[in-house]
Amino acid sequence: MKKEIKISGFKTPENYFEDFELQLYGRIDEEKLPKSSGFKVSEGYFDTLEEKVIAANATSLKQSKVIPLFQTQSSSYKRYFGYAAAVAAILFIGTIIFNYQGSTKSTLDTIQLGIIDKYIEDGNLNMDLYELSAYFETDEIPLETFGNQYINQTNLEHYLLENTDEELFMMDSSEN
């Protein structure tokens, strides 16, 4: 560790701070300060000063542009007309941009039904028959269209043989 130095190294003469004030006033007396400040005012300046200030203030009030808080109706219509024109332009451009219908827009009619069938057959639609039937109301499906159709007996047997499990037939035959 370093040793602490207790002596600062700066020295002042003896009685320096005691005699400082006396020495300062002594020097001021020796220098002989001038009795006048060096600034001169012309005669009658303060007699006409008030009139000059009022005249300058009156001319500055006439020259400045002040926007009144409550404008006349003709000027307020002009201001609001500018705002209305800007809003109308923005709405016009916005409707053009957001309502633009390009040739690439797809609707349900333009989608091929074969693509939808392939999507469902590939297992991409994770819904069973009960979940799908929840989206359809029975009021929307006319039952009269199904009642008038007759199914051919041979087509029905062929469909059941291809699409049902053999275990189901065995269970039915064993119960009888």
Image (cartoon, helix red, strand yellow):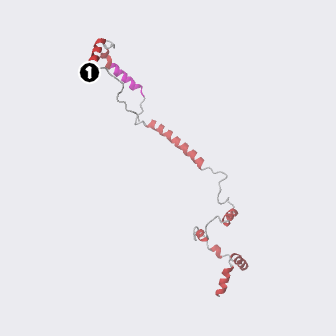
Is 77 in front, or is 10?
A: 10
Residue 134, by quadrant, is bottom right
Identify which amino acid the numbered label 1 is placed on. Answer: Glu
Horizontal relation, residue 21 to residue 97: left or right: left
Is 53 in front, or is 81?
A: 53
Image quarter in which the N terminus is found: top left
Horizontal relation, residue 15 to residue 148: left or right: left
Residue 46 point in image, percent of width and height: 30, 16
Image quarter in which the C terminus is found: bottom right
Residue 155, by quadrant, is bottom right
Q: Inspect this view and state whether residue 147 appears.
A: yes
Magenta region, main secondary structure: helix
Q: Residue at x 45, y 35 (%)?
A: 75
Q: Which residue is mark 1?
A: 18
Q: Residue at x 27, y 14 (%)?
A: 26
Q: Is residue 63 magenta?
A: yes
